[in-house]
Amino acid sequence: MTVTSRRDIPDADIVMLDLSPAAVLGIYGDVMPTRINRSYRRYRAGSSAFKVDFAIEGDVGWTNPDCRRAGTVHLGGTFAEIADTERQRAQGTMVQRPFVLVGQQYLADPSRSVGNINPIWAYAHVPFGYTGDATAAVIDQIERFAPGFRDRIVATVSTSTTELQTYNRNFIGGDIIGGANDRLQVIFRPRVAVDPYAIGVPGVYLCSQSAPPGAGIHGLCGYHAAESALRWLRKRR
């Protein structure tokens, strides 16, 4: 079932929206208070991600031995280099050496592997809505810290920013963190409010990563939204 209007939602005491602010506007915008509606319209998207899944032969040959037992590895170089590449990315430039995050969870869960073939995934920070192919940049960045990596690759599957949005409509333009983490928005999302989970419609709450504390703090957006909803429900009864 595709929900395109609040009229598509069955009657309920509480409605929890695991959606982007833009999607919330599409469903409830006509009944949201003007002030909140405007705040949602001003909400800014974050940078995008370009994902690559790999099947590799053996392990990743990281030059840093600690990385060989880590579930995730962050690749960016020096502090100055990371700051520079992230600044350029925020300005819309696709850099040669993007910040890359690598997941090698097979180290903790060998059932993911088949014989000596192991799965890893990686994603690069790219400009919002980037339409190019960052596969080579991802491989080059891993190769930089793990020489010989490209020779271990058995297969790759790349997922563009557009494909990420197709997979999950909350990933607008390939933004997988639910909105920019800049200025006040890193703390006050999707708006400045005592109860940022309430959308201004009785019983309806935002529980996605576009609500505090944002992406990466797994589960807490929904937890706090549920607490807010239950407080409202108790007062109502």
Image (spheres, helix red, strand yellow):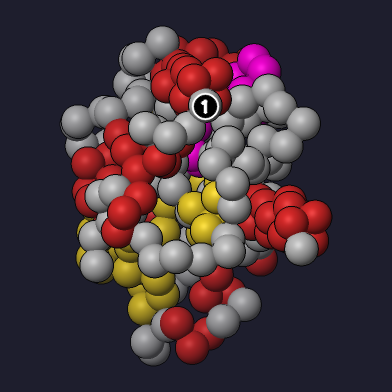
The residue shown at (51%, 13%) is: 87
In the drawing, does residue 213 fall left or right of residue 104? right
- Near mark 1 (Cα within 10 A), the count class, few <14, some 14-19 or many ≥20, is few
- Comparing 99 with 201, the one in front is 201
The residue shown at (37%, 87%) is: 114
Residue that sits furthest to the front in the current view? 237
The residue shown at (58%, 30%) is: 190
Please give the range of residues in magenta.
Answer: 177-186
Under tag 1, what secondary structure?
loop
Amino acid carrying label 1: it is Pro
Q: Position of residue 108 (x, y in %)?
A: 62, 77
- Comparing 232 with 222, the one in front is 232
- Comparing 70 with 211, the one in front is 211
Visible in this render: residue 163?
Answer: yes
Dividing the picture into quarters, in which one does residue 105 lie? bottom right
Q: Does the magenta run of residues contain 183?
A: yes
Visible in this render: residue 147?
Answer: no
Q: Position of residue 60 (x, y in %)?
A: 48, 61
In the drawing, does residue 39 fall left or right of residue 172? right
The N terminus appears in which quarter of the rendering? Answer: bottom left
Count of all numbered marks drawn on residues in the image:
1
Q: Does the magenta run of residues contain 152?
A: no
Q: Where is residue 205 in the image (x, y as percent from the top left)?
A: 58, 49
Q: Mark 1 points at which residue?
A: 33
The C terminus appears in which quarter of the rendering? Answer: bottom right
Dividing the picture into quarters, in which one does residue 30 lie? top left
Which secondary structure class fits the magenta region best? loop
In the drawing, does residue 141 fall left or right of residue 94? right
Q: Where is residue 112 in the image (x, y as percent from the top left)?
A: 45, 82
The residue shown at (28%, 40%) is: 161
